Image (cartoon, rainbow, N blue to C red):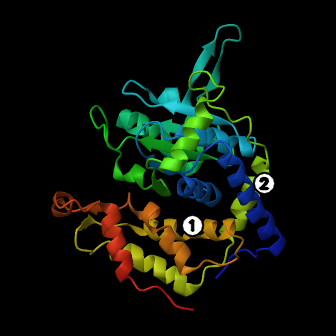
Amino acid sequence: MTLNALDPEQLAKAGALAQAMRREVQKAVVGQEAVLDQVLASLFAGGHVLVEGVPGLGKTLLVRALARTFRGEHRRIQFTPDLMPSDVAGHAMFELEKAEFRIRKGPIFGHLILADEINRAPAKTQAALLEAMQERQVTIEGQALPLPHPFMVMATQNPVEQEGTYPLPEAQLDRFLLKIAIGYPGEVEEQALVRQVTEGRVADDLQVEQVEVVATPEQVLEAQRAASAIRVDEAVNAYAVRIARATRDWPGIALGAGPRGGIALIRAARAVAMMEGRDFVTPDDVKAMALPALRHRITPSPESEIEGHGPDALLGALLERVEAPRA
């Protein structure tokens, strides 16, 4: 059942906008097409993403290029053990000249926020993001300050280097719509990347000048509204719920996904359908988003970890067994 009627013209505009933004980002970011598609899906679904991968794979460049496509403000916050909540959200400062307090906004006030190595900051600082991610506002000295719209946090963490890190609590992991695994580029892509970065450039300057502005923040919000109105058949909705529920008693999974798992699946699948210009969600849309939507919402059992079966392997086996609806 659809709550909002979706105008075909609105859908066409939203789909064309998504493809135009995708093409522009690809001018700066070589390869990583699946990662880009998932980041765009999260943006149009109004969610946040957690990106896991080793340093140097273009995460900062991706945020800068994506923000440029719609004149969005981007901010990069380097999370460190001594980072304070006020360094993220902002604080009140006293002005002697006016004899009054003034709110100094932190770097969280932007459209796209890159929270780099989020697991290096202690829990108190990580929690400073929770209100922003969930409520789209920041409270400073009792004053609620709205964040810009659209607003998306793209947090990163290194899967290899764990010394001096603070694992994200389950409550915060659940706030991320998708967890994206970013790997090394292919050989041809890496050759193109090296050529693009080294020809005529000094040091590691990230160039996004070739990325053209093709949208405004208001148009991105329109695309988000279009994605939220994509039709989801009851059978497809039930399929997403079955996948999420199956994680709770699947062999090798100690802790399964909660109700937010099914919600994330449908929200991300709607965005995928919108990006492809369809006004309905297919079972394949749900299946395509299952890994990024659920891999951070399940906990493998100790036996699975010993045997080398991670979240992706367990979810892959589960998806093969959960029956999809047929037309």
Instruction: Look at the numbered discs 1 and 2 and tell me whether their residues touch, using CB distance below 8 Å.
Output: no
Q: Residues within 10 Å of mark 2 (few under 14, many from 20)?
A: some
Screen quadrant of the N terminus: bottom right
Determine the image quadrant of residue 62. Answer: top right
Find residue 273 and report its horizontal and vertical position in percent: 64, 71
Tell me if residue 227 comes above or below residue 85 in the rendering: below
Residue 143 appearing in the image: no
Q: Residue at x 62, y 55 (%)?
A: 40
* Residue 75 marker: none
Q: Observer-nearest residue: 164 or 64?
A: 64
Find residue 3 and report its horizontal and vertical position in percent: 68, 76
Q: Residue furthest right?
A: 9
Q: Which residue is mark 1?
A: 267
Distance from label 1 to label 2 (Cα)? 19 Å
Q: Amino acid at mark 1?
A: Arg
Screen quadrant of the C terminus: bottom right
Q: Amino acid at mark 2?
A: Gln
Q: Observer-nearest residue: 50 or 84?
A: 50
Q: Residue at x 46, y 85 (%)?
A: 324
Q: Residue furthest top?
A: 97
Q: Residue at x 57, y 67 (%)?
A: 267
Q: Which residue is mark 2?
A: 219
Determine the image quadrant of residue 196. Answer: top right
Determine the image quadrant of residue 232. Answer: bottom right
Q: Residue at x 16, y 58 (%)?
A: 306
- Look at the numbered disc 1 and give the secondary structure of its residue: helix
- Look at the numbered disc 2 and give the secondary structure of its residue: helix
Of the two numbered discs 1 and 2 on the same chain, state the one appearing first in sequence. 2
